[in-house]
């Protein structure tokens, strides 16, 4: 069933273009590979293995002060990269396809907000957005930019030059004594603050899953872009689509969890392929 396209093959653009045209309306699921051309690294290599240390687990974050010190220290140093990132050709192409009526709904596993910056509107952030922070006690929400000001004021001595970052905006720092690092507290109740994103080991809210399922029921097919699908929260939607007799295509560099059950696989960079496809589709429409 799967149709693999080699790097030297000249068919991928026309094959993916045909998939999009013949499967209207279309749902799209995006992952970290969409943002690499914006300077935000992805999680995994071409074989699906972790590139960096596994992210903080939800249970560790809420139970251990040292883990919160680890998270917020790295986030303080890495946040500017996320805040200053701009959409790349993949994000702008997807926004253009939506505005042309060729994408019914876009679901992203990313938390960087770049799809919104590019102009996508029919959008759901499956794992939340890093631009907001929430109190686990009173549920007060505060912009991440304001939390950054608090972090900088309370931790002026943590002024390191870093050049390794992770997809969620954390800086990779090792061998630092963080015992005196001051973790930000909720300005309303002094409770534990957590970025308003789904951590590893945390459940995606049921209402978000239901919203994606509803969109998949209305769509004719699913196109996955820039995701290895190794995390079940995204892979489940490929399974659901196939179990309901609909097609799934993937545009992604390297192996994905769904490789054995796809209708089309394009193993090429999305920021190269998708703009060309978009140009051809918009020309036709």
Image (cartoon, rainbow, N blue to C red):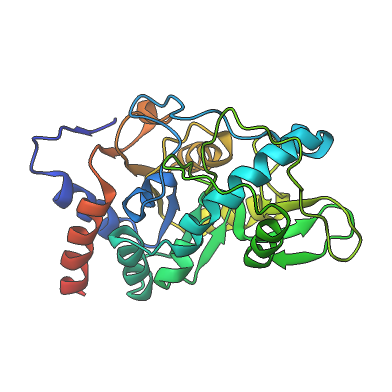
Specify whether residue 104 is in view: yes
Relative to the observer, which residue lies in front, 49 or 179?
A: 179
Relative to the observer, which residue lies in front, 150 or 39?
A: 150
Q: Position of residue 232 (x, y in %)?
A: 57, 34
Residue 124 figure quarter? bottom right
Relative to the observer, which residue lies in front, 165 or 175?
A: 175
For image coordinates 60% across by 51% down, the residue present is 76
The C terminus appears in which quarter of the rendering?
Answer: bottom left
For image coordinates 69% across by 52% down, the residue present is 155
The image shows residue 250, relative to residue 230, as above or below, that is below
Specify whether residue 120 is in view: no
For image coordinates 59% across by 34% down, the residue present is 55
Q: Position of residue 109 (x, y in %)?
A: 52, 49
Relative to the observer, which residue lies in front, 18 or 141?
A: 141
Q: How many marks?
A: 0
Q: Position of residue 266 (x, y in %)?
A: 25, 40
For image coordinates 14% across by 35% down, the residue present is 7
Q: Is residue 193 left or right of residue 92?
A: right
The N terminus appears in which quarter of the rendering?
Answer: top left
Furthest-front residue in this view: 157
Q: Is residue 237 left or right of residue 284?
A: right
The image shows residue 70, relative to residue 118, as above or below, that is above
Q: Is residue 191 left or right of residue 55?
A: right
């Amino acid at each position: 069933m799967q149709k693999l396209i080699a790097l030297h093959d000249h068919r991928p653009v026309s094959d993916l273009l045909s998939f999009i045209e013949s499967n209207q309306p279309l749902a799209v699921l995006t992952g970290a590979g969409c943002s690499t051309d914006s300077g935000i690294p992805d999680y995994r290599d071409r074989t699906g293995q972790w590139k960096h240390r596994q992210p903080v687990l939800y249970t560790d974050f809420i139970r251990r002060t040292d883990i919160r010190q680890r998270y917020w220290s790295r986030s303080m140093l890495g946040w500017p990269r996320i805040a200053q990132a701009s959409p790349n050709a993949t994000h702008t192409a997807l926004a253009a396809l939506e505005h042309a009526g060729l994408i019914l709904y876009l679901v992203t596993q990313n938390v960087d907000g770049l799809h919104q910056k590019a102009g996508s509107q029919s959008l759901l952030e499956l794992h939340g957005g890093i631009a907001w922070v929430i109190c686990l006690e009173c549920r007060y929400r505060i912009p991440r930019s304001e939390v950054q000001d608090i972090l900088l004021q309370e931790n002026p001595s943590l002024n390191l030059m870093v050049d390794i970052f992770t997809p969620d905006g954390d800086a990779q720092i090792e061998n630092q004594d963080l015992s005196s690092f001051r973790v930000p507290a909720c300005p309303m109740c002094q409770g534990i603050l957590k970025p308003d994103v789904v951590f590893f080991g945390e459940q995606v809210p049921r209402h978000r899953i239901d919203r994606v399922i509803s969109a998949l029921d209305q769509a004719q097919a699913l196109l996955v872009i820039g995701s290895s699908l190794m995390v079940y929260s995204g892979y489940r939607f490929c399974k659901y689509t196939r179990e309901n007799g609909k097609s799934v295509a993937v545009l992604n560099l390297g192996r994905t969890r769904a490789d054995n059950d796809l209708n089309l696989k394009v193993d090429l960079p999305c920021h190269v392929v998708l703009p060309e496809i978009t140009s051809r589709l918009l020309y036709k429409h």
